[in-house]
Amino acid sequence: MSGGAVAIWLIVIGLAVYAIYQPGPHHPRTTKLLVIGGGAVFPTVVLTGLLCYSLPMLPDLQRPAPTGSLQIHVSGVLWWWRIEYIGEDGQTFATANEIRLPVDQPVEFKLHSEDVIHSFWIPSLGGKVDMIPGRQTRLQLHPTRVGTYRGACAEFCGTAHAQMNFDVVVMPVDEFNDWLIAQRKDAKPPQESVAIEGQRQFLKHGCSACHTIRGTDAQGKVGPDLTHVGSRVSLGAGILKNGPENLARWITQTHKVKPGVEMPEFDSLSDDDLKSMVAYLEQLK
Ligand code: CUA
């Protein structure tokens, strides 16, 4: 396919350059060459060839995932990612905007959309796949190198499309298993007094209407699951590095950081209330 694409590019660009240096706008020889060569005959022949070459490969796209594949459901939501790990034992848990994978193990993503068409893309690991409302699409990957990769939405989906990103962390198997065990657990009750106060503020300001923190009264389903938000690489769907300062910024200047986002901006919180809320959320590891 790449070879075919390069051939088309070379011939079309070659003809365009040739046409630029021809005298007069309607030189009949140039017109004929462009229409027959670059415009009609050549593309028809090459594209038909590539179509015949690629059609027999289609069934391959439907092949089931290799046994033992990690199963992850990802939903595109304006403008973030809902992520669910499906355990072989049926034990599932939700997270958001961050996918962790064990190195050298196959993974299958089942992709959905909850609103408009998004596209799931981790450029360093594989091709992009559309996420279409009412349909399920799939992507199989086999990461071979440990590292942190950037994922992004690759289909224009509205105001904050360019800020709909996620982190993909490929980890050694042992580390991944530890992470999995920790993520499956409910949030630990806060220990320090500032975090206890922060949890009170979180519930008082209605954050729980949209966010779930497993093991607490916060069971909202509209926004990202925050059960272990303190353990994540970034905030706001891959746009701010996770840390107390950025979290405070995200809570109080949400719409400046990410125009169009549905979360209301809590810019009237007192400094103390904000500090305690940040302390509470950051200790959710
Ligand atoms: Cu979602 Cu662009």
Image (cartoon, grey):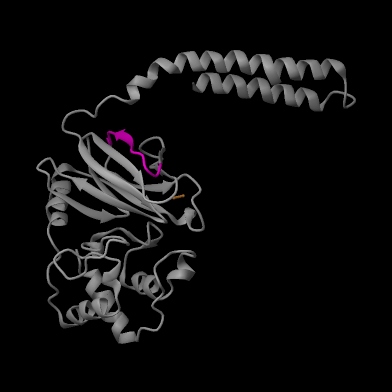
* Residue at the far front in the pictured view: 134
Q: Is residue 142 magenta?
A: yes
Residue 126 in the figure: left or right of residue 231: right
Q: Classify 58 as above or below 159.
A: above
Residue 152 in the figure: left or right of residue 222: right
* Residue at the far right in the pictured view: 24
Magenta-colored span: 132-144
Q: Main secondary structure of the magenta part?
A: loop
Which of the 4 quarters of the picture holds residue 15?
top right
Point 15% across, 79% down: residue: 192
- Image position, residue 47 (x, y; %): 56, 18
Residue 122 in the figure: left or right of residue 227: right
- Image position, residue 273 (x, y; %): 29, 84
Residue 54 in the figure: left or right of residue 89: right
- Image position, residue 281 (x, y; %): 25, 70
* Residue at the far left in the pictured view: 89
22 or 265: nearer the viewer: 265
Quadrant (top left/top right/bottom left/bottom right) for the C terminus: bottom left
Q: Classify 270 as above or below 81.
A: below
Q: Classify 76 as above or below 185.
A: above
Point 65% across, 15% down: residue: 42
Point 45% across, 56% down: residue: 163
Point 85% across, 23% down: residue: 22
